[in-house]
Image (spheres, rainbow, N blue to C red):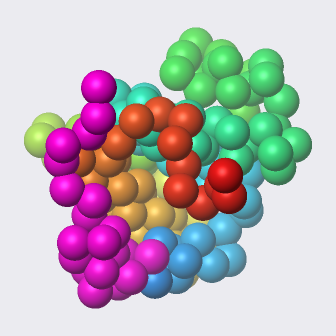
Amino acid sequence: MTNSRLNFAKTAPKAFKALIGFDAAARAGLDPALVELVQIRASQLNRCAYCLHMHTSDARKAGESEERLHMVAVWHEATNFFSEKEQAALALTEAVTLVSGGVPDDVYARAAGQFGEEELAQLLALIFTINTWNRIAITTAKVPGTDERVAR
């Protein structure tokens, strides 16, 4: 079965390039391991298999343990696998990703207590970008394991 949906990158190249730039700017100054954890958690919540496959693969390549990768989905119950800072980032990721209920003050305060103001802004930008990427991948029916960044 072939994908009959549009290729967003080719069809909207200016928007795609702008999002690439926003994504790169969002990551600046953040710990790369934290970046992957945030992207994995948002992708799990959004049920984006394409992005989940991409970011778990990236995390493995960067040296993330299988043990921690398996625990991201249940981080609330497996807090011993994640630092306080990572837990605050994961909680904020969940609140922003599932924003229909708002971002609770305690979740925001927890993140603000772990991240300086500029780093918190970067983290928020990262959460915004992964949610946008998830929506693009889901809407255009991207197939997991077909990451265009990998030369074939």
Q: Residue at x 58, y 71 (%)?
A: 27
Q: Which residues are magenta?
A: 1-20
Magenta-span inclusion, residue 14: yes
- Which image quadrant is residue 139 in? top left
Residue at the limit of the structure toward the front, as seen here: 1
Magenta-span inclusion, residue 16: yes
Task: Point out residue 33 in the picture as x, y percentages from the top left corner.
Answer: 73, 51
Would you say 90 lies left or right of 124 here? right
Would you say 117 lies left or right of 84 here? left
Q: Does residue 28 lie above or below 114 as drawn?
A: below
Q: Residue at x 29, y 34 (%)?
A: 2
Q: Residue at x 63, y 78 (%)?
A: 28
Task: Point out residue 128 in the picture as x, y percentages from the top left corner.
Answer: 34, 62
Q: Does residue 115 lie above or below 145 as drawn?
A: below
Task: Point out residue 51 in the picture as x, y percentages from the top left corner.
Answer: 47, 42
Q: Is residue 140 visible?
A: yes
Q: Residue at x 73, y 62 (%)?
A: 31
Q: How many marks?
A: 0
Q: Nearer the viewer, residue 59 or 99?
A: 59
User: Magenta-highlighted stretch: main secondary structure?
Assistant: helix
Would you say 112 lies left or right of 5 here? right
Q: Does residue 83 lie above or below 111 as drawn?
A: above
Quarter of the picture containing the N terminus is top left
